[in-house]
Image (cartoon, rainbow, N blue to C red):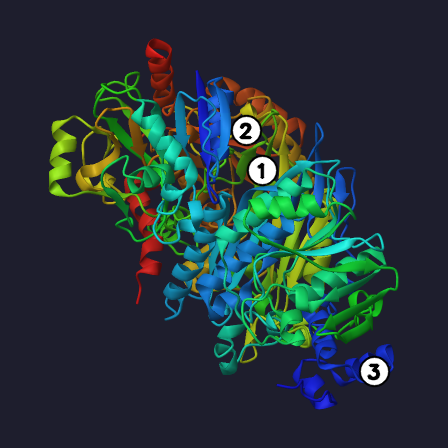
Amino acid sequence: MPDPQVTLPLALAHGLSEEEWRRVLDILGRVPTYPELGIFSVMWSEHCSYKSSRVHLKKFPTSGPRVLQGPGENAGVVDIGDGWAVCFKMESHNHPSYIEPYQGAATGVGGILRDVFTMGARPIASLNALHFGRPGHPRTPHLVKGVVAGVGDYGNCVGVPTVGGQVVFHECYDGNILVNAFTLGLLRADKIFRGCASGAGNPVWYVGSKTGRDGIHGATMASAEFSEETEQKRPTVQVGDPFTEKLLLEACLELMETDAIVGIQDMGAAGLTSSSFEMAGRAGSGIRMNLDEVPVRETGMTPYEILLSESQERMLLVARRGCEEAVRGVFAKWGLDAVRVGEVTDTGRAEIFWRGEKVVDMPVGPVSDQAPLYDRPQAPPADLAARRELDLSAVPDCRDPEGALLALVGSPALCSRRWVYTQYDQTVRTNTVRGPGGDAAVIRVKGTQKAVALTLDVNPRYCHLDPFEGARLAVAEAARNVACVGAEPLAVTDCLNFGNPERPHVMWEFARCVEGMAQACRELSTPVVSGNVSFYNETHGEGIFPTPSVGMVGLIEDVSRCVGNAFCEEGDAVVLLGRTRGHLGGSEYLSLLHGIERGTPPPLDAGRERALLALLRELACEGKVKSLHDCSDGGLLVAVAECGLHSRAALGATLSLQARGMRLDGLLFGEDASRVVATCAPAMLQPLLDRARACAIEATLIGTVGGEALVVNVDGQRLVDRPLRDLRAAWEEGFESVVKRR
Amino acid sequence: MKAAVVEFPGSNCDHDAYEWSSRLFGLDTARVWYTSRDLAGADLVIIPGGFSYGDYLRCGAMAARSPVMESVVEHARRGGLVIGICNGFQILCEAGLLPGALLRNRTLTFLCREVCLRCETADSPFTRAVGKGGLLRLPIAHGDGNYFCDPETLDALRAEDRVAFRYVNPRGQTDEAWNVNGSLDAIAGILSEDRRILGMMPHPERASEALLGSRDGAGVFESMMATMGGTG
């Protein structure tokens, strides 16, 4: 079939704007060929070019003494000392996962793994943030089961442990679920590989799976809103093969042990096109390729299809001249295709041939890094003031704290995620010191005393009510979670999930979130080293809550000093670190018990947070505490209950609290920031209180660990007295009730 | 005393098995690629877990027919020790070195969690240091760990004291609620007729360091060390 004639209407159908079409004509000085139009369309898609977000992303702090590689590469790299570094990134696979949850989620995991091992790092841990629609939505159980199985099956087969993450339910995701996958890899600090096609004359190799027709225009799909037609876009979802990924991973790492590789990059979104253009773009070089050499899985594939296919488990690499045998040998051992498809040139142009004909001849620079940039109009949402209004005098105070606590721990938002994480291999590679269920996962670094701590966080409700403060709080909570296992927060990766950027209120929310994250990252000295933006999470004009997922990585110098979040021993003191003011705006309690999602998120004092983070690390390192648990969603009572629920011995506690004129619901379930529940041996209590005071952190003895029940007295009155097993039953059954609903 | 860890395309616990043998127990350990027929003079062969050949066809089916397995069969015939863990157990069944098969978990999902095992016999090179009735907490991580065999085989396994481990509750009693993958007779691991081959679904190599939460798996390796040290 001959290629269609390239015209403005065809360009518009490819998602280019009229202005972008004119720019294409300017750059080429002629009408593009059909494959060239395809290349412009994917390279200038929102997904690949970040054209609406780049002007804002510049606001992130991206450097620091430990940063070895910031944004702009396949993943960020941070020095952890002793010659070691960690490489990590988070990416979205939202649109494909809604259309085909199993394959969409699986290939999301595959993509992020490749982004990490292409840097020369062995992936040692994955996390994922999953946001689903309301539990009662008819599609939710199907989506939950498919996504969890997809994430699990892929990571399990490759042999990378999935050690934590986040699962959120909210009706704002009814038509647009979020699947954000995070992977961290370990590498030598002086052996970082980059996606760079340098050295004219060096051969370009295609390695991995054959190219098929799957996933053509996936990147373009991820750059448009959903509609009924999207349901018919199932063919644009890629199909994953984790076995091939495992072989590709081992082959690439084995070849990296030699000095054959000049540059290497995953063929992810926009496949062969983006990998070749980005690699040449970074090096300022050119590239010549012959598509007849590309291994294909189907007959009759056109240049357009070969260039735009998003078939999985493929990499493009530039090798040193003369290393052909090394490349062939390693890939043959692993039973994978490795084919020389072209070479690096110094022309600055991409010249692509097919059946002897030059089908693409265009300059690399203007396509790869002079993509259009938009500073799109912004306006606060019309109902913002109404969202923030909260009249607590109209909300009756809590009369049944015990019932409220049971409802909260059994709710979809806060119940145990065991149903999810038992489907993930959490312990392969024997590095998992602390897996799912903790404040942060802890992965040791073999051959050293060190460990890394990992967590993902965001509270979309906070971001909906105040995108700036919500994003700031997400960074702070992530840092606190990492500090609660005794780690120093090092750096951040992000996945920014938003609606349609062409709507001014979405753009306003995006800009405020970026600014809030940037400010918190500066305040806490945790630079952003990698990330991803996912726009167009909208269906029928209904957007999601702003959801800037924050991935935080921390460092523990002595892994034997890391602490958990569970009660350890009868008689230990329970201490609340941080100040309680009873803030209820945007809280889980108001949402679940009163159906109110209004007000402002709790205020965050950066100085106080910094002091708390330092104190937590010190208490853990010096062995002054036995457990630390961040107090966030659901407030103090939920945090204390979780300490008991996580304890193997099923230890309860007795608390004695003072209301000091506060509302009861605020005291028990308020979500004031920068608070942590700590436990320590009775003999350590005074030193702990003294240290906290010296750091200007409020510290209050609130109770004692022990017994089989959670008992809470407020101003001498017993308000809660419930066996822990009742709370456990609610907590453990909560998730099953979501997935079994029909 | 020497060990060999056999590696297939898709093995992913090979590194863990190697660490278990070499770093934790100090054995001279070779890594043997599936195309090789040379087991490097090993006294002990470890078939590690993972997804050999992506679990395509059937778990372990293709690995069981690879060149290295001919050498493993030969090694076993000479009375050499063989331990297959998780996918390694599946491969040993597919290779005919152990009876029965591992079916899809009763839950129809992958399951990764800690389980309780009861050691059912001290009379084996893999369990003598654990002792009959000894309780172990070990992780499982599999989608197909539901042990099954025909009634005659089950009778033989019982009569010949070849059930090495059963899934039990934390008090050490068999309890269907704790037989999480639905295995026949709660079987978690079995021995060959000559008791020199063990296949088990749980992962002792993931639970041999206090830092990782349990040292219970070390007993299996200590048993093998004692055997090899004693009888060669």
Cβ–Cβ below 8 Å for labels 1 and 3?
Answer: no
**Whole-Å distance between the Cαs marked 3 and 2?**
59 Å
Looking at the picture, how far across and down is residue A738, in whole percent? 35, 60
Cβ–Cβ below 8 Å for labels 2 and 1?
Answer: yes
Q: Residue A711: tell me if it is visible.
A: no
Task: Write down the quadrant of residue A51 in the picture.
Answer: bottom right
B128 to A277, vertically: above or below: above
As helix, strand or loop, the secondary structure at mark 2 comes to loop
Q: Earlier in the sequence, mark 3 or mark 2?
A: 3
Check chain identity for marks 3 and 2: say if they share one: yes
Q: Earlier in the sequence, mark 2 or mark 1?
A: 1
- In the rendered image, which residue does mark 3 sit on? A25
Residue A562 shows which numbered tag?
2
Residue A453 shows which numbered tag?
1
Q: Residue B136: tell me if it is visible.
A: yes
Q: Earlier in the sequence, mark 1 or mark 3?
A: 3
Three-letter residue code for mark 3: Leu
As helix, strand or loop, the secondary structure at mark 3 comes to helix
Q: Chain of mark 3?
A: A
Three-letter residue code for mark 2: Cys
Looking at the picture, how far across and down is residue B62, in whole percent? 38, 47
Looking at the picture, how far across and down is residue B5, in whole percent? 45, 30
Check chain identity for marks 1 and 3: say if they share one: yes
* Residue depicted at 88% across the width and 64% down the height: A347
**Whole-Å distance between the Cαs marked 2 and 1?**
10 Å
Q: Chain of mark 2?
A: A
Q: Is residue B74 left or right of residue B54?
A: left
Judge the density around disc 2: few (<14), some (14-19), many (≥20) Cα neighbours within 10 Å. Answer: many
Please state, as top left, top right, bottom left or bottom right, where the N terminus of chain A lies in the image. bottom right
Q: Chain of mark 1?
A: A
Frontmost residue, A496 versus B47: B47
- Number of marks: 3
